[in-house]
Amino acid sequence: MSEVQLLPVSKTVPMPLLERARELGVSEFGESRVQELLVKAAQVEEAAPRWVMIGPLQTNKARDLARVAHEIQTVDSAKVAQALQRRLEQADRRMTALLQVNTSGEEAKSGCAASEVEALLEATAACDRLEVRGLMTIATRGGDEAETRRCFAALREVRDRLSATSGVALPELSMGMSGDLELAIEEGATVIRVGSALFGARPPLV
Ligand SMILES: *Cc1c(COP(=O)(O)O)cnc(C)c1O
């Protein structure tokens, strides 16, 4: 079996707990809001961890993100890719990137449609500051096991089809969170994004 990487998701996790995780050797954190990521990044002193953006990005936040983040898993439009490209050029930085695909079909979810991923991959190929490593998805909220599995399998199938037609490898599949990571691994996840199972339950959203 190939290796599955665990991305610790630190959104809403207070700094002391994050620092404790760093002492235990955690060197990478996923955050879903640019503002929170920036505030935390500014508080961490030496040996900066790798900051990974896992929430939707508004283009007016691209500049801030480009200055501090190392990866974005939520590129879902050419507009977002191009905004980041421009800001990464200005900051003379690079980021690794995943393209987010909406496999659940839920309207409220970000991510491009499966039918649009090929065009998005072409658009990002022109953005040389973004190194596209694969795809990311979030399964249907509250879906049963079959539905969750369907979302993950769909991402893998999109990847397989796309890498065959484009010749781009796209090795990474980021899928699965605390509640559905076993299914994600069975369906081929290479990255699982784990928050509450590591850091405890988050306060409810207000
Ligand atoms: C919050 C979040 C996670 C982690 O969720 P848990 O259920 O706490 O593991 C994973 N992925 C994304 C995109 C998130 O926003």
Image: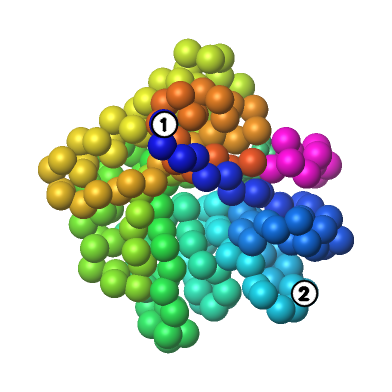
x, y percent for residue 136: 43, 43
x, y percent for residue 49: 63, 67
- Describe the element under mark 1 as helix, strand or loop: loop
Colouring rule applied to residues: rainbow
Quadrant where the N terminus is found in the figure: top left
All told, the count of numbered labels is 2
Name the amino acid, label 2: Gln
At x 27%, y 53%, the residue is 120
Closer to the chain start, of discs 2 and 1, is 1
Name the amino acid, label 1: Met
Asked if the stretch drawn in magenta spans residue 119, the answer is: no
Q: Is residue 188 visible?
A: yes
Quadrant where the C terminus is found in the figure: top right
Foreground of the two, 189 or 123: 189
Residue position marked by numbered label 1 in the rendering: 1
Foreground of the two, 149 or 79: 149
Residue situated furthest right in the rendering? 16
Foreground of the two, 22 or 139: 22
The residue at label 1 has a CB less than 8 Å from ligand 1: no
In which of the image's four quarters is ligand 1 placed? Answer: top right
Residue position marked by numbered label 2 in the rendering: 43
x, y percent for residue 167: 15, 49
The residue at label 2 has a CB less than 8 Å from ligand 1: no
- Describe the element under mark 2 as helix, strand or loop: helix
Whole-angstrom CA distance, mark 2 to mark 1, is 38 Å
x, y percent for residue 169: 24, 49
The boundaries of the magenta stretch are: 195-206
Report whether 199 appears left or right of 48. right
Asked if the stretch drawn in magenta spans residue 202, the answer is: yes
